[in-house]
C-alpha cells in the first residue's frame, strides 16, 4: 500500500470530493501530497494528527494542510455518527494566475502555501461563513469540461481563501496576545519524534527525555493517532527520503543514511513498504517526468 501516495496535479491541478461519506471501517493513515489540501468537516468525530499537534475532528471544522506535510485524518465513523467531509486538493502554482487581480488573496494563498502557519485547524468555521452553501452549489454545478471545471473550482477556492484570510487575521491577533499553549503529552511526543526521526530510534531514549514510561508512550500514541510510534517514524523517514531522492547529487545510499536507514537493503525494503516502489524506481520515475516537462 502506497501510504505517501501523490496526487497527479500535472494533468489536473484541481481535485475535489464534496460531501463524501466515509465507509464505516475508514480509519485513514499518515500521508502527504504535493498540493495544498483544504478539509471541511460536515459530520463526524476523531482527530487530525500533524507533526506537532493533535486536533479534534468536530462538525463545522476546517483544516488546511501544506504541500508535502505529513498528516493523518483519523476519523471514527459509525452507524450513528457518519464521517462526511469535503476535500479540495490543488496545485497552488496553478491557482495563482486566477488570483492575479486580487493581491490580498494571492498573499493569503502564498502564506498558506509557504508560510510558517501558526494554526491549521479552524473549529466551527462553517458556522461563521456560508461554506456549506458554497460547497453544495459547486457540487451541483461543477462542469465535466476540464477548462470550465478548473475556473469554477478556482472560484470556490478563492471564496474559501477569503474566509481563511479573515480567520488567519483574527487568529494572528489572538495568538500575539495569548499565553503560550501547553502541549499535550501526545503533541510533545510528536514534536520529539519530528526532531529526532533521522537518529537510530530507541523508545528508551524517548521515554527518558520526556520522563514518561515506555508503556504509557506506546499506549497513548496508539490511542491518539491510531498508529504505533515506529510506524510514524517510518512515515517521516519515507517522506523525507522522497524529497532527497529528487536531488540527483545524492546517491541512494546517502539518502538512506540521511533519513536514518544507513543499511541500503533495509532502506530499499522500508521505502518500498511505504511508497510502493524502490528508491531507484522512485528516482527514475521522477527523472522521466522532468524530461517530459522540458
Image (tube, helix red, strand yellow):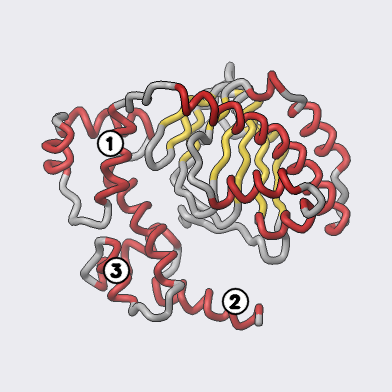
Q: Quadrant of residue 261?
A: bottom left
Tag 3 residue: 256
- Among numbered discs 3 and 2, the one appearing first in the sequence: 3
Q: State how far apart marks 3 and 1 are (Cα).
A: 24 Å
- Among numbered discs 2 and 1, the one appearing first in the sequence: 1
Tag 2 residue: 289
Q: Any mark on residue 238, and which?
A: none
Q: Quadrant of residue 275?
A: bottom left
Q: State how far apart marks 2 and 1 are (Cα).
A: 37 Å
Q: Is residue 291 above or below residue 91?
A: below
Mark 3 vs mark 1: in front: 1
Residues packed near mark 2 inside 10 Å, few (<14), some (14 to 19) or many (20 plus) = few
Mark 2 vs mark 1: in front: 1
Residue 46 shows up from this direction: no
Q: Is residue 33 above or below residue 54?
A: below
- Among numbered discs 3 and 1, the one appearing first in the sequence: 1
Q: Are marks 3 and 1 in contact (CB under 8 Å)?
A: no
- Mark 3 residue element: helix
Tag 1 residue: 189
The structure residue drawn at horizontal position 58% and vertical position 19%, both measured from the top left corner, is 81
Q: Is residue 96 above or below residue 158?
A: below
Q: Quadrant of residue 133?
A: top right
- Mark 2 residue element: helix
- Mark 1 residue element: helix
Q: Are marks 2 and 1 in contact (CB under 8 Å)?
A: no
Q: Who is closer to the viewer here, 266 or 6?
A: 6
Residue 250 lies, in percent from the top left, at: 35, 78
Residue 63 lies, in percent from the top left, at: 57, 35
Residue 116 shows up from this direction: yes
Q: Who is closer to the viewer here, 77 or 96?
A: 96
The structure residue drawn at horizontal position 54% and vertical position 31%, both measured from the top left corner, is 172
Amino acid at each position: 500500500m502506497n501510504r505517501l501516495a501523490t496526487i497527479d496535479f500535472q494533468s489536473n491541478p484541481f481535485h475535489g470530493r464534496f460531501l463524501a461519506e466515509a465507509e464505516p471501517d475508514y480509519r485513514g493513515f499518515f500521508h502527504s501530497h504535493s498540493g495544498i489540501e483544504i478539509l471541511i468537516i460536515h459530520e463526524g468525530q476523531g482527530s487530525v494528527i500533524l507533526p506537532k499537534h493533535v486536533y479534534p475532528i468536530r462538525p463545522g471544522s476546517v483544516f488546511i494542510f501544506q504541500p508535502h506535510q505529513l498528516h493523518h485524518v483519523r476519523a471514527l465513523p459509525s452507524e450513528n455518527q457518519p464521517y462526511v467531509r469535503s476535500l479540495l486538493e490543488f496545485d497552488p502554482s496553478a491557482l495563482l494566475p486566477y488570483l492575479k487581480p486580487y493581491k490580498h488573496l494571492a498573499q493569503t494563498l502564498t502564506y498558506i502555501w509557504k508560510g510558517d502557519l501558526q494554526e491549521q485547524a479552524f473549529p466551527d468555521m462553517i458556522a461563521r461563513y456560508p461554506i456549506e452553501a458554497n460547497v453544495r452549489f459547486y457540487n451541483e454545478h461543477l462542469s465535466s469540461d476540464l477548462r470550465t471545471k478548473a475556473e469554477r473550482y478556482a472560484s470556490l477556492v478563492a471564496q474559501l481563501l477569503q474566509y481563511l484570510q479573515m480567520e488567519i487575521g483574527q487568529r494572528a491577533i489572538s495568538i500575539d496576545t495569548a499565553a503560550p499553549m501547553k502541549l499535550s503529552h501526545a503533541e510533545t511526543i510528536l514534536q520529539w519524534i519530528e526532531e529526532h526521526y533521522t537518529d537510530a530510534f530507541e523508545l528508551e531514549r524517548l521515554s527518558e527525555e520526556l520522563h514518561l514510561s515506555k508503556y504509557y508512550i506506546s499506549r497513548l500514541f496508539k490511542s491518539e493517532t491510531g498508529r504505533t510510534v515506529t510506524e510514524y517514524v517510518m512515515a517521516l523517514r519515507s517522506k523525507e527520503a522522497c524529497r532527497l531522492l529528487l536531488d540527483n547529487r545524492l546517491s541512494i545510499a546517502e539518502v538512506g543514511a540521511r533519513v536514518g536507514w544507513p543499511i541500503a537493503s533495509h532502506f530499499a525494503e522500508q521505502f518500498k513498504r511505504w511508497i510502493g516502489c524502490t528508491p531507484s524506481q522512485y528516482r527514475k520515475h521522477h527523472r522521466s517526468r522532468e524530461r517530459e516537462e522540458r
